[in-house]
Amino acid sequence: MKSVFISSTFKDMQAERDYLHERIFPRIQRELKASGETIQELDLRWGVDTSDMTEEESGKQVLKVSIASIDRCRPYTIVLLGERYGWIPGISVVKEANDTRVNEHYQENMSITNLEIRYAALDDEELRKRCIFCFRDPSFLADVDQEERRIYDAESPMH
């Protein structure tokens, strides 16, 4: 079985992730079945239970699960990018995660999504060849009503 890691910010990429889950992966699964192969998407929207944790414990858990999930799916990653930068863990969360893989790729004020992308593809040319990058056209926002637009807009002018 091949696994594919899906990386994106969560809030603004719900529809795209749902489309992959409901339409794209079932179709790929049907195509692969003929050759005896299977594929599994790894979407962390379903996989990190942090309900009984403090914010800091939750952050460490998300970091560890993200990196372990990428390792499990290597070399296959799909990256969905829009205007949002994503959650930025505090430096103490990164240090306390105590993971050399994280420390190797993390830069101060880096979002988890940025870290995932660097670790999964950008810092290794061979991995990058097996990664699919999908970019949302910013003109999409012109057709989104103001109330819903906050879901898609960048969190700050810096990101």
Image: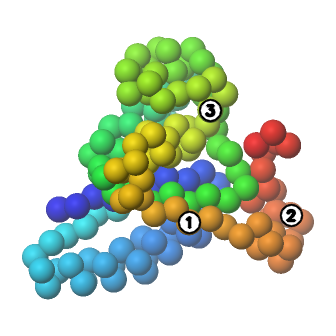
In percent of the image, x 45 and y 63: which residue is there?
A: 132
Identify the image quadrant of residue 77: bottom left
Position of residue 150 measured from the top left corner of the image (x, y, whole percent): 81, 56
Where is mark 2, residue-wise?
147
In percent of the image, x 46 and y 22: which residue is there?
A: 103
Position of residue 146 measured from the top left corner of the image (x, y, whole percent): 89, 66
Q: Quadrant of the C terminus?
A: top right
Counting residues from the start of the chain, the first of labels 2 and 1 encountered is 1
Q: CA distance from mark 3 to mark 1?
A: 20 Å
Identify the image quadrant of residue 81: bottom right
In percent of the image, x 17 and y 62: which residue is there?
A: 1
In percent of the image, x 53 and y 27: which residue is there?
A: 106
Question: Is 13 above or below relative to 87?
Answer: below
Where is mark 1, residue-wise?
134
Foreground disc of the pair 2, 3 = 3
Of the residues shown, which amino acid type is indicated by label 2?
A: Glu
Q: Secondary structure at mark 1?
A: strand
Residue 48 visible somewhere in the drawing: no
